[in-house]
């Protein structure tokens, strides 16, 4: 099972992103990068091509959620961008996830990894109950959504690192867990609540950790990235 550290490039323009990436020109490892909605909507698909041309792997985090036909067609467009990983909301149903997988699969049978968001880490059990009228516990909901993603043929889920063990138990060790909410033991939490360190994430069973501000806002982003790799991958 592949394991890696993914840097969340939460920047508002391609200029800011490229200035950040220039710092890694002499780095021994080429980081796996996450492009989210902010950067994609600001800079468009060209930012994906430009970053790909620099040799980085890309997780395109656009969290699609629509009717199956629309998601299938959108995924076909995204598959031509040659990213390495992308995602949908599991709440879109098994049919929508199957359609996403179909759309993402290229004529030669290859495709990026496809993962599902279960419940966002910003959604509390209280909000699930009172606003979404979901009576299950948040953990039962996360496990069921992960099982739905597995049934649809997806490769894994995005979840809190603290949920990775429970997802692995329900869906098997080869079902990937991609976990944001990572902080160094000696650092600020920012607005994240359910967090853990890179080392602990490895122990719990995360396959990919997604790290934003601990790297992007660090005084020395390359050193912070290499520290993540050392703690998470043991390299
Ligand atoms: O800066 P920080 O390390 O908190 O960034 C985490 C990244 O992971 C951000 O891009 C955030 O949008 C994303 N994310 C998250 N929690 C989720 C899903 C995605 O923090 N449940």
Image: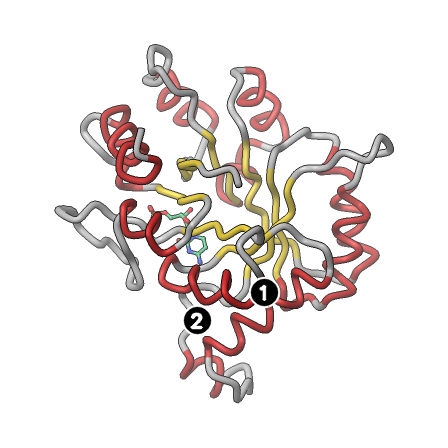
Q: Position of residue 176 (x, y in %)?
A: 54, 50
Residue for badge 1: 146
Q: Nearer the viewer, residue 47 or 52?
A: 52
Q: Position of residue 165 (x, y in %)?
A: 42, 62
Q: Residue at x 61, y 23 (%)?
A: 49
In the rendered image of this protein, does residue 129 appear above or below residue 5? Answer: below
Q: Residue at 53% across / 41% down in the picture?
A: 1
Residue at point 44%, 80% (across, down): 127
Q: Secondary structure at mark 2?
A: loop
Tell me the crowding category of disc 2: few under 14, some 14 to 19, or many 20 or more residues within 10 angstroms, Cα based: few
Image quarter of residue 198: top left
Which color scheme is applied? secondary structure
Disc number placed over residue 123 in the picture, else none: 2
* Placement of 197 over or under 57, stated as above or below: below
User: 177 and 76: which one is in front?
Assistant: 177
**In this image, 104 relative to 35: left or right?**
right
Name the side, left or right, on which 162 lies relative to 43.
left
Classify residue 121 by image quadrant.
bottom left
- Is residue 86 toward the left or the right of residue 212 in the image? right
**Looking at the picture, how far across and down is residue 219, in whole percent?**
18, 29
Image position of 163 (left or right of 54): left
């Amino acid at each position: 099972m592949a394991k890696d550290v993914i840097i969340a490039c939460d920047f508002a323009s391609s200029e800011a992103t490229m200035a950040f990436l220039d710092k890694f020109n002499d780095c021994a490892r080429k980081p796996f990068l996450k492009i989210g909605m902010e950067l994609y909507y600001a800079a468009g698909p060209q930012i994906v091509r430009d970053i790909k041309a620099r040799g980085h792997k890309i997780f395109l985090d656009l969290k699609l959620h629509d009717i199956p036909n629309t998601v299938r067609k959108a995924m076909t467009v995204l598959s031509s961008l040659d990213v390495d990983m992308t995602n949908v909301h599991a709440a879109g149903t098994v049919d929508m996830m199957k359609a996403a997988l179909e759309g993402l699969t290229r004529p030669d049978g290859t495709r990026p990894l496809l993962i599902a968001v279960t419940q966002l880490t910003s959604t509390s059990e209280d909000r699930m109950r009172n606003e979404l009228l979901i009576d299950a516990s948040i953990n039962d909901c996360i496990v069921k959504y992960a099982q739905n993603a597995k049934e649809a043929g997806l490769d894994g889920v995005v979840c809190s690192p603290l949920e990775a063990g429970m997802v692995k138990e329900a869906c098997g060790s080869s079902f990937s867990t991609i976990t944001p909410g990572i902080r160094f033991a000696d650092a600020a939490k920012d607005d994240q609540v359910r967090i853990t360190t890179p080392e602990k994430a490895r122990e719990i069973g995360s396959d990919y950790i997604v790290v934003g501000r601990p790297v992007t806002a660090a005084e020395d982003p390359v050193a912070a990235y290499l520290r993540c790799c050392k703690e998470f991958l043991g390299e």
